[in-house]
């Protein structure tokens, strides 16, 4: 797993993998939708992902890392 992924980013990656929209993530985590978009932008940069699908694929390939 990328060691520089924050706890909040891990939460968002998990929710993306579960199919949550940005608005649903913002409601669940009680943060603004703009903040969610910013987190996703940094997640994509860190993972070199080009889409939410690639973020979800990363989650499922590394699921053990998320359960620690």
Image (cartoon, helix red, strand yellow):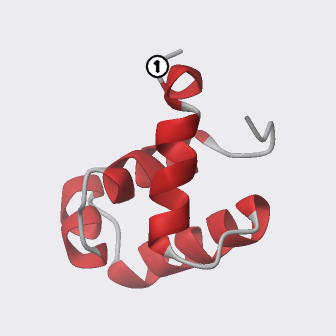
Residue 36 falls in image quadrant: bottom left
Kindly state the secondary structure of the residue where label 1 is placed. loop
Q: Position of residue 62 (x, y in %)?
A: 58, 33
Query: 17 or 7: nearer the eye?
Result: 17
Which residue is at a point 28% across and 63% down the rendered structure image?
25
One can see residue 35 in this view: yes
Which residue is at a point 53% across and 77% down the rendered structure image?
51
Q: Residues within 10 Å of mark 1 (few under 14, many from 20)?
A: few
Looking at the rendered structure, the number of numbered marks drawn on it comes to 1
For this orientation, the residue located farthest to the top is 68
Q: Position of residue 28 (x, y in %)?
A: 20, 55
Left or right of 41 on screen, residue 46: right
Left or right of 37 on screen, residue 27: left
For this orientation, the residue located farthest to the bottom is 34
Which residue is at a point 45% across and 67% down the rendered structure image?
53
Q: Position of residue 9 (x, y in %)?
A: 55, 52
Residue 29 falls in image quadrant: bottom left
Q: Position of residue 67 (x, y in %)?
A: 46, 19
Q: Which of the image's four quarters has the N terminus?
A: top right
Left or right of 19 on screen, residue 60: right
Vertically, is 61 above or below 58? Answer: above
Which residue is at a point 46% across and 71% down the rendered structure image?
52
Left or right of 55 on screen, residue 15: left
Vertically, is 67 above or below 5? Answer: above
Q: Which residue is mark 1?
A: 67
One can see residue 10 in this view: no
């Amino acid at each position: 797993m990328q060691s520089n992924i924050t706890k909040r980013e891990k939460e968002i990656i998990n929710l993306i993998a579960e199919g949550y929209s940005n608005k649903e993530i913002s409601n669940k985590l009680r943060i603004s939708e703009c903040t969610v978009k910013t987190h996703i932008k940094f997640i994509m940069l860190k993972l070199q992902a080009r889409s939410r699908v690639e973020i979800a694929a990363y989650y499922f390939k590394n699921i053990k890392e998320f359960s620690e």
